[in-house]
Structures are given as structure tokens and as C-alpha cells.
Image (cartoon, rainbow, N blue to C red):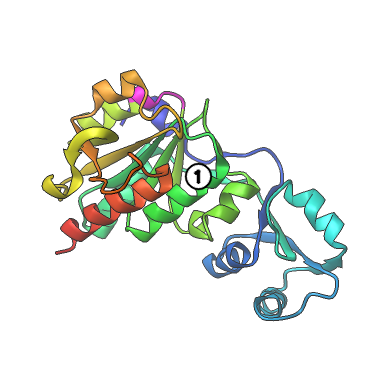
Amino acid sequence: MKDYERKEDQDTEPAEHIVAGRTAVLELLRCGRSVDKILLAKGAGEGSISLIESTAREARIPVVRADRAKLSAVSRGANHQGVVAYTAGAVYVSLERILEIAAERGEPPFVVLSDGIEDPHNLGALIRCAEGAGAHGVVIPKRRSAALTPVTVKSSAGACEHLAIAKVSNLASTIDALKEGGLWVYGAEADGTPVYEQDLRGPAAFVMGSEGKGLSHLIRQKCDFILSIPMYGKVNSFNVSTAAAVILCEAARQRNR
């Protein structure tokens, strides 16, 4: 793997990282990542809030009650549902590490790439789809892309805590590196081969394009195959995260049969 990929290892978001929402915070506690402090809304104590509080106290994590206005301010727009956790900066891994995870599991690499997805809700949903389908990691570009913000983490429903995520300087060069490593690269567009007719069982990377423009011209050119999802209604495409769910689950089905 090339030097520029190794430099991505242990890249972090600046300073303090916020995880908001009940499911996301529960998954954070379960995965064992370091948590500095948890804020709970005053008066909240029902259901999963009590589980979060008891789990945090057992782990000797400070739990502080605060006004909902305080939680809204620190979560920066995420739907916090009465709970916010402070952790160290979001940790990104190298592309090499994602391939190592596949090797450790004895599985052909299964990687998902985001080509310019700028909505953090969509990126979070994509990460959730990738983790649920058994992918080994997600790759996002440094520029013109959403990052691991509180909204992204919340939208992933905790999947960010269980899936390796790499941030790369150049997505086109990263695709070249994956192809050199023996992976087939599949792009998702409306005019491709129906996904159910394509063999997806080998080492593979799946590229999902931006919400409005789809795959960029250069990235599409670098794909070995273009996949589409047959549509039977009046609209001609799905939201990017819905399309990812269909394609990645079909890949998972083929890989596990």
C-alpha cells in the first residue's frame, strides 16, 4: 500500500468529539471506546436513558445532568434524545488497515467508498448500511464530503463505533490502489448492469455517488463495472443510502451463500 495511505492512520477530528442520541451512545459504551463524560437531560430517566446511566456509572464514566438547551448546543444540530457523550476525537484508520481487517477475518475485501456525499445524514445512513451488510470499512474523501460529525454518528445508529472508516486525500488514487490490490470496483448509477445479474462475490469496492450528481466523471471512468437497481415505479432512482442498502445487501447475500 502506498505511503499516502499509511499517513491517514490515526487521523482524528479536532479536539473533542460529540456522540448524540440514545442508540449511538449505547453502542459507544458497548464498543469500549474511551468516554470522557456523559450529559443527560434533567428529568429524563425512562427506558434506554436509565440503561445508559447505569452502564456509564459501572464503567466509572462521569454522568452530569444538564438542561436540554445545553445538550442542544453541544450536539450542534443532532437529535440528542436527551443524551450526549464526550469522547476523544473521531479516529480514522488507513486504507491498509481496512484490508488487514478483511485478511484477519479470512474474507475477500468488501469496501464501500463515498464519492462526494455531503449530507451527514446520508453519510451516516451509508455507514449503517455498510456495517449491516458486513463491509470491512468505508472510505470518505477529505474534501467535498461530510465527515464524522455528531449528525453523521447519530444517523449511523451506532455503526460508526463498529466499522473502520478511512479518510483519504484523493479518492481516484485510492481506487487505483484498491485495483492494484486485486479488488474489482463497482460504481452505482442508473444506467448500469442490473445488480442482481452481476457476480459480486470476489474482492470488491462499491462506490456510491453524491446525492444530486451521482458519480463524478473521473471516478466513474475508474470503475470496472457500473451497477443499477431495477425500478418499477414512476421515480427513476433511490436515495443514496437506500440504493446502498440494496446493492450492499445483494453483495452480502452472494458472498455468504
In the figure, is residue 82 to the left or right of 43? Answer: left
Find residue 115 and report its horizontal and vertical position in percent. 41, 31
Residue 215: percent from left, percent from top: 35, 28
Place of residue 135 in the rendered image (x, y in percent of width and height, measured from the top left): 33, 53
Q: Residue at x 26, y 46 (%)?
A: 231
Tell me the crowding category of disc 1: few under 14, some 14 to 19, or many 20 or more residues within 10 angstroms, Cα based. many
At x 83% / y 67%, what residue is drawn?
A: 64
Write down the region rendered in magenta. 169-173
Foreground residue, 224 or 90?
A: 224
Say which residue appears at 51% left-offset and 29% top-offset.
142
Furthest residue to the top? 218
Give x and y (percent) for residue 210.
Answer: 44, 32
Tell me the SS state at disc 1.
helix
Magenta span: helix, strand or loop, mainly? helix
Residue 170 lies in magenta, yes or no? yes
In the image, farthest residue toward the front: 234
**For this view, does 24 lie left or right of residue 36?**
left
Q: Label 1 belongs to which residue?
A: 122
Quarter of the image with the C terminus is bottom left
Q: Nearer the viewer, residue 231 or 71?
A: 231
Q: Amino acid at mark 1?
A: Asn
Say above or below: 114 vs 27: above
Looking at the image, how many numbered discs can be counted on the residues? 1
**Vertical relation: 199 (above or below) 55:** above
| Magenta segment includes 6 | no
Which of 68/98 is in front?
Answer: 68
User: Taking 6 as reference, is 175 left or right?
Assistant: left
Residue occupying the point 30% across, 29% down: 175
Specify the quadrant that holds the N terminus. Answer: top left
